[in-house]
Amino acid sequence: MANPVQASASDHDYDIQALNDGCREEIVEMEQAAADVLFDLNSPNPKRTKKRSAIKKQDDVNLSHAVQSILTRFDGLDGKLENIECRMDGVQTTLKKFDVLEKKLEGIENRIDKIGQSTRENKENIVKLQERVECLSSENKILREKCLESERYKRRWDLRLVGVPEKTTRIPEMLSLAFSPV
């Protein structure tokens, strides 16, 4: 297949055109053979027909066995599929229960948040009230001291005059009697 013109260049140089032509011829022959098989209009040879029919029967038996085994597998798969569907139903009911529990949990969380908020408010109120009690206690202490001090001054000036009645309402007359010469 070496090109005589290029034989001197290298042992592996081939004529590409010749290779392409050879491949095209083989492709055309294969296409023709395939067309002859598909569109064979000649009557078949009776010996070949018997052999082909026996092979075809065997193929049909093998095919029916294969189909039967596939159907058996499908039946097994149907059982498995029903089992899976059953499990999926169980999973779905469980998911629904989880959804209900999740909603309840959200309600509980909201309640806890409200309780926490009111607890904080109560603590703040307690602190304010404690401050108010301290303020009132110090004010009360101051007022008691003032009361005690005013009682001391009252006792100091609480004098009894001899000869002057205590339940009189006219003090100036009483004072003039007390200090008048006798």
Image (cartoon, rainbow, N blue to C red):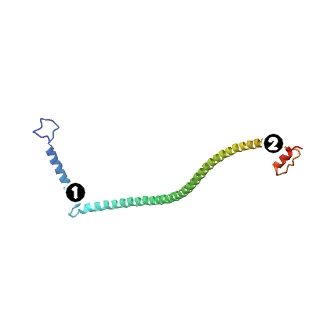
Residue position for label 1:
34
Residue drawn at 18 percent across, 50 percent down: 26
Quadrant where the C terminus lies? top right
- Report the number of numbered marks: 2
What amino acid does circle 1 point to?
Answer: Ala
Outermost residue, right direction?
Answer: 182
- Nearest the viewer among 87 and 161 is 161
**56 up-or-down from 6: above or below:** below
- Nearest the viewer among 120 and 137 is 137
Q: Quadrant of residue 6?
A: top left
SS at badge 1: helix
Whole-angstrom CA distance, mark 1 to mark 2, is 143 Å
Q: On the rendered structure, is 63 left or right of 24?
A: right
- Nearest the viewer among 140 and 127 is 140
Residue position for label 2:
155
Residue 118 x/y as whole percent: 61, 51
Numbered disc in front, either 1 or 2: 2
SS at badge 2: helix
Q: Quadrant of residue 40?
A: bottom left
Residue drawn at 80 percent across, 40 percent down: 156
What amino acid does circle 2 point to?
Answer: Arg
Near mark 2 (Cα within 10 A), the count class, few <14, some 14-19 or many ≥20, is few
Residue 163 x/y as whole percent: 89, 46
**65 up-or-down from 144: above or below:** below
- Nearest the viewer among 104 and 57 is 104
